[in-house]
Amino acid sequence: MRTIVSLAVILGSFASAWAESACPGENKEAAWRLFQAKASKDPTELARAAEAFRVECGLPLAFWAGPKTKQKQKIEHPCGESVQVFVKAIPSPSDPEMQSEEVLEFGPAGAVIQRWSVPIDSVVGGVAGGELLILEEIVEEANIPPVYLAVSSGGTFRVVPFSSRSPNTSIACPPASGLPSSGYWECWKIVDGESGAERRFAYEGPCS
């Protein structure tokens, strides 16, 4: 109950519409629409409220449909069938119902040294230690800032405020990187926001 009360305080008066139980499935979409309607223009407040919503209900993120995805959940996508699901953690690329994409980090010799699972069509906005910062526009309005999904290599994530960072630099993908066959792979040099070190990543750009 303490979590629900705290969420009501953060999200404002509309929280009472769904605070009677943790977050019943049939109310998630309505609760999310109310969240978007009341979204703060302040990056810190917006991220704090979105993180509280994630803890309680999950966030609606897009993944590829898997072999066990129900037909009524599938959404047409330029590169296949997708599904939008409220999740509290990122599923694996092999999940039978909702499949993520991967971001790969490669070392000086071009070998993959670390992997992260992310929603489809993700844009990596930065990296901070063990967390990738995925740019996410949770409200598609010009006056509402985006947030970052700070994703760990184990699939857990949290919502953190958007802030300006050193721009990523496009680089050639190393021939020894072992990237799966795809015409959408992009490679980037990204400055670690914690250590200041330059790190190299590969991920598939948005499919269109």
Image: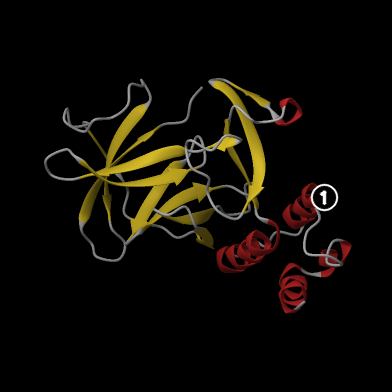
Position of residue 159 measured from the top left corner of the image (x, y, whole percent): 54, 60
Q: Which residue is mark 1?
A: 30
> What residue appears at the point 83 percent right and 52 percent down from the top-left corner?
27
Q: Nearer the viewer, residue 6 or 193?
A: 6
Would you place residue 15 above or below residue 156 in this image? below
Q: Is residue 10 visible in the rendered structure shown here?
A: yes
Residue depicted at x 58% and y 30%: 66
Between 153 and 14, the residue placed more toward the observer is 153
Please state the horizontal and vertical placement of residue 181, each as a whole percent of the image: 33, 21
Query: Helix or strand or loop: what does disc 1 sit on?
Result: helix
Residue at x 73%, y 53% (from the top left corner): 36
Residue 151 lies in quadrant: bottom left
Give the colouring mode of the picture. secondary structure
| Whole-percent x, y for residue 105 in the image | 28, 45
Q: Where is residue 170 drawn, in percent x and y?
A: 27, 37
Residue at x-position 72% and y-position 31%: 73
Relative to residue 75, is residue 134 depicted above or below? below
Three-letter residue code for mark 1: Ala
Quick check: 94 left or right of 24?
A: left
Q: Residues within 10 Å of mark 1 (few under 14, many from 20)?
A: few
The answer to whether residue 140 is seen in the rendering is no
Q: In what quadrant of the picture does the N terminus appear? A: bottom right
Given the current orientation, which residue lies at the most extreme left position? Answer: 109
Q: How many marks?
A: 1
